[in-house]
Amino acid sequence: MALPNLPATSAARRRSRTARAPPAPQSLHQVAEPVWSLGRLNHVAIAVPDLEKAAAFYKGVLGARVSEAVPLPEHGVSVVFVDLGNTKMELLHPLGSHSPIAGFLQKNKAGGMHHVCIEVDNINAAVVDLEKKRIRSLSEEAKIGAHGKPVIFLHPKDCGGVLIELEQA
């Protein structure tokens, strides 16, 4: 049996004005969790005009553990790794005529900080996400870096003037 259409009482009218629609399902309001995150500082890279002299300074004067020079022709550098316990430094010296470090040293004769490397837990997701955020990288995709893990460099003009290397943790 259908109920007759009766005029609403003033109390019923007040309730209908203050009544709220049922909340939307939670999933419509959730922000997607990031699919990648930053990890620890992996290393600070320093371009040096004299690799032997720089390695001798960190080993002999500062007492750091220093590796032998490692040539990385695919990256156009020779690297000496300086172990600092909680992180590393990489001393970079040009290797070959197309070395990116050669250009840096032409502008900075005494050498200097070249880049910082930060670990990420998912480098492929980071590359996609940063591209969406209009952060340029210096290559189309991640390449294998000095530690045998995928790396990508972010353009310093998009990163506050700092060349940032992201490395898969």
Image (tube, helix red, strand yellow):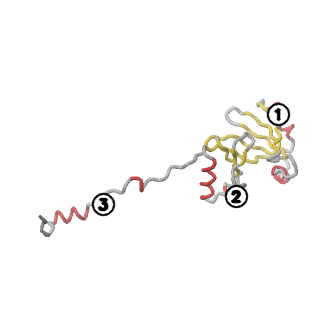
Nearer to us in this view, 26 or 156? 26
Query: Residue 159 lies in what quarter of the image?
Result: bottom right
**Looking at the picture, which amino acid does disc 1 mark?**
Glu
Q: Which mark, residue 21? A: 3
Q: Could you tell me which residue is drawn at 31 percent across and 57 percent down?
A: 22
**Looking at the picture, which amino acid does disc 2 mark?**
Lys
Query: Residue 144 lies in what quarter of the image?
Result: top right
Q: Position of residue 147 (x, y in %)?
A: 73, 39
Q: CA distance from mark 3 to mark 1?
A: 69 Å
Q: Which mark, residue 157? A: 2
Given this view, does label 3 or label 2 mark the residue nearer the observer?
A: 3
Q: Residues within 10 Å of mark 3 (few under 14, many from 20)?
A: few
**Looking at the picture, which amino acid does disc 3 mark?**
Ala
Residue named by callout 1: 68
Q: Residues within 10 Å of mark 2 (few under 14, many from 20)?
A: few
Placement of 85 over or under 116, stated as above or below: above
Q: Position of residue 125 (x, y in %)?
A: 60, 50
